[in-house]
Image: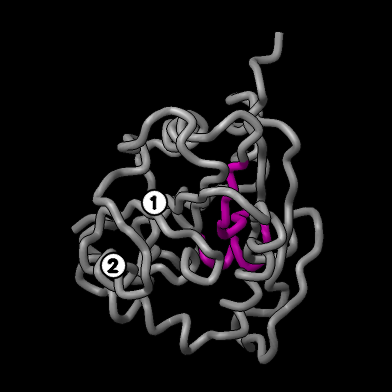
């Protein structure tokens, strides 16, 4: 069984997590929303059940797990079956592209970022939401991932690693937002604010912009 099969067979359980952990969910949404452009057409890569696309106003997504896609469609998202490394869109189709807890499951995350860049208009933004491996909670996730139904196939990434991909792809204006600072064992009762930077919050949202023209 691979990660797609896990999400295919456990879509309902995945979706229920957000209802059972509203504080973490709202914290993540707030961090991501601060980086989403106020206008323009967006795409979510790895749309899952639409838990992020819907509240963030994104109408189009790609998702390889059909059971997840079905739930996203019920939330009003137009979902296309596709992989992040081979997006079925023309060059410069979107003003921004969102990927949330997606890079840790990809076979080739650098290629996925390159594909996202290809589909972005000049000046468009790539926004990535992820568990930061170098945060205290991220290290805990990494140690215990073999016991998790959903994360046992994940390869968690650090903020520095992802930012190095973006720089290699000539993205610029990289911004970071981190949130969920409380011990995951005790849980958070209320949504937590986000701060700039990385390395302390379990959840990291970052954005980077595609240049209007290649840098000489």
Residue 68 drawn above or below residue 80:
below
Q: Residue at x 52, y 35 (%)?
A: 120
Q: Quadrant of residue 139?
A: bottom right
Q: Residue furthest right?
A: 196
Marked residue nearer the N-terminal end (1 or 2): 2
Q: Residue at x 68, y 73 (%)?
A: 180
Q: Is residue 180 visible?
A: yes
Q: Residue at x 53, y 64 (%)?
A: 57
Question: Which quadrant of the figure contains the C terminus?
Answer: top right
Residue 161 drawn above or below residue 104:
above
Q: Is residue 43 left or right of residue 162?
A: left
Residue 196 drawn above or below residue 215:
below
Q: Secondary structure at mark 2?
A: helix
Q: Quadrant of residue 146?
A: bottom left
Residue 59's spot in the image, x, y percent? 43, 59
What is the number of callouts on the image?
Answer: 2
Circle 1 residue: 105
Q: Are marks 1 and 2 in contact (CB under 8 Å)?
A: no
Q: Residue at x 73, y 78 (%)?
A: 192
Q: Is residue 155 left or right of residue 192?
A: left
Q: Is residue 102 left or right of residue 183?
A: left
Alpha-carbon span between mark 1 and mark 2? 15 Å
On whether residue 138 falls in the magenta region, the answer is yes
On whether residue 77 falls in the magenta region, the answer is no
Residue 171's spot in the image, x, y percent? 65, 30
Q: Secondary structure at mark 1?
A: helix
Bin the neighbour count of mark 2 within 10 Å (Cα to Cα): few under 14, some 14-19, many 20 and up: many
Q: Is residue 46 left or right of residue 22?
A: left
- The magenta region covers 125-142
Circle 2 residue: 68
Res 119 label? none
Bin the neighbour count of mark 1 within 10 Å (Cα to Cα): few under 14, some 14-19, many 20 and up: some
């Amino acid at each position: 069984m691979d990660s797609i099969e896990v999400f295919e067979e456990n879509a309902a359980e995945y979706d229920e997590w957000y209802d059972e952990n509203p504080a973490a969910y709202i914290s993540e949404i707030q961090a991501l929303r601060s980086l989403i452009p106020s206008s323009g057409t967006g795409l979510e890569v790895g749309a899952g059940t639409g838990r992020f696309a819907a509240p963030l106003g994104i109408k189009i997504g790609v998702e390889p797990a059909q059971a997840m896609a079905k739930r996203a469609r019920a939330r009003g998202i137009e979902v296309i079956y596709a992989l992040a490394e081979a997006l079925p869109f023309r060059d410069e189709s979107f003003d921004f592209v969102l990927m949330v807890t997606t890079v840790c499951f990809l076979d080739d995350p650098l290629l996925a970022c390159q594909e996202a860049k290809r589909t972005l208009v000049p000046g468009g933004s790539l926004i990535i939401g992820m568990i930061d491996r170098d945060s205290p909670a991220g290290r805990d996730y990494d140690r215990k991932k073999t016991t998790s139904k959903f994360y046992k196939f994940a390869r968690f990434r650090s903020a520095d690693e992802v930012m190095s991909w973006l720089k290699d792809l000539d993205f610029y204006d990289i911004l970071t937002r981190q949130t969920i600072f409380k011990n995951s064992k005790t849980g958070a009762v209320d949504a937590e604010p986000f701060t700039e930077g990385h390395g302390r919050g379990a959840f990291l949202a970052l954005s980077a912009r595609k240049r209007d023209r290649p840098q000489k």
